Image (spheres, rainbow, N blue to C red):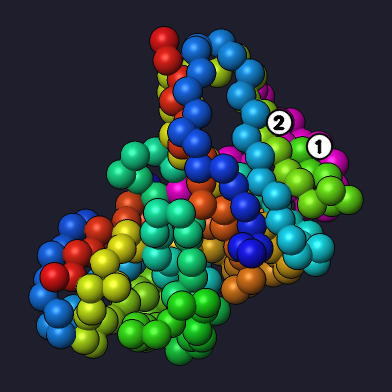
């Protein structure tokens, strides 16, 4: 089954404790990205990756890091989480960039609470 | 002013009603317009996709784009309880998959049996 898998689904952590949210896709997609979803603000892009070893900042990258060492995996790293990073996070992947009709597949989401 | 405005609702309709969901936007450079459906505790899934102005129909769903008014709509005919979800509009200047996609905040729809 084609899917984007995020882990964990739920996470409560304390301020300053480094964490990683994993994302893996089994569709051989080139493009992967991370979003956060907050009430009233919609989905906002954090980071994206065009392919292996190619990553770039989205609209709200502060406080986040990513890496793309393998095509299937795109982890999101919070080096020193703060309460304003409490949010619902989604990983998404698309076959490739620039192809009209390419569908973005979203993961199930990770609800992160930073206390 | 947000680039994409969407009434958050909530919107509640009886089964069988015609539902109209709308978004307005400020950036006239947007060319690609999408509607996503997001069930509770799930990720968004692409529902409809249109390029530039015009209509597109898929079963009970019709997407309309009016670029002159910077206004897009999603119509759901014969709405079903299974249509209960949050609907997100999204738009981009370049084909989706680039980093310029902008999402509305989502409209929460409930279809009552």
Disc 1 to disc 2, how far (Cα)? 7 Å
Residue A24, horizontal then vertical, whole percent: 33, 66
Q: State which quadrant residue B96 falls in.
A: bottom right
- Percent across and percent down for residue A55 are 48, 85
Residue at (46, 48) in percent of width and height: B44
- Residue B101 appears in which quarter of the rendering? bottom right
Looking at the rendered structure, the secondary structure element under dot 1 is: strand
Residue extent of the magenta highlight: B44-63
Name the residue that disc number 1 marks. Answer: B55
Main secondary structure type of the part rendered in magenta:
strand
- Does residue B21 appear to the left or right of B107 in the view shown? right
Question: Which residue is pictured at 71% across the width and 31% down the height?
Answer: B62
Q: Is residue A82 above or below residue B71?
A: below
Letter of the chain that mark 1 sits on in the rendering: B
Q: A102 or B48: nearer the eye?
A: B48
Vertical comparison of B75 with A7: above or below: above
Report the residue at 11% width, 75% height from top.
Answer: A14
Task: Indicate left or right for B54 with B13 as reference.
Answer: right
**Residue in view at x 52 percent, y 78 percent:** A58
Query: Is B83 on the left-hand or right-hand side of A1?
Result: right
User: What residue is shown with label 2?
Assistant: B62
- Is B4 a magenta residue? no
């Amino acid at each position: 089954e084609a899917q984007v898998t995020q882990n964990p689904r739920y996470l409560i952590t304390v301020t300053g404790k480094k964490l990683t949210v994993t994302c893996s896709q089994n569709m051989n997609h080139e493009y992967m990205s991370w979003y956060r979803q907050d009430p009233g603000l919609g989905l906002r892009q954090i980071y994206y990756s065009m392919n292996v070893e190619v990553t770039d900042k989205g609209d709200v990258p502060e406080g986040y890091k990513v890496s793309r060492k393998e095509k299937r995996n795109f982890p999101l790293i919070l080096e020193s989480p703060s309460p304003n990073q409490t949010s619902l996070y989604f990983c998404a992947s698309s076959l490739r960039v620039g192809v009209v009709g390419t569908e973005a597949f979203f993961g199930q989401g990770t609800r992160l609470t930073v206390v | 002013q947000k680039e994409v405005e969407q009434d958050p609702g909530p919107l509640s309709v009886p089964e069988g009603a015609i539902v109209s969901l709308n978004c307005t936007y400020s950036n006239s450079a947007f060319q690609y317009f999408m509607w996503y459906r997001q069930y509770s505790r799930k990720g968004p899934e692409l529902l409809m996709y249109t390029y530039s102005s015009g209509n597109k129909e898929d079963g009970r769903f019709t997407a309309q784009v009016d670029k002159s008014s910077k206004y897009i709509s999603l119509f759901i005919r014969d709405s079903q309880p299974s249509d209960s979800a949050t609907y997100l509009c999204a738009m981009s200047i370049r084909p989706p998959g680039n980093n310029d996609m902008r999402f509305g905040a989502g409209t929460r729809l409930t279809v009552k049996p």
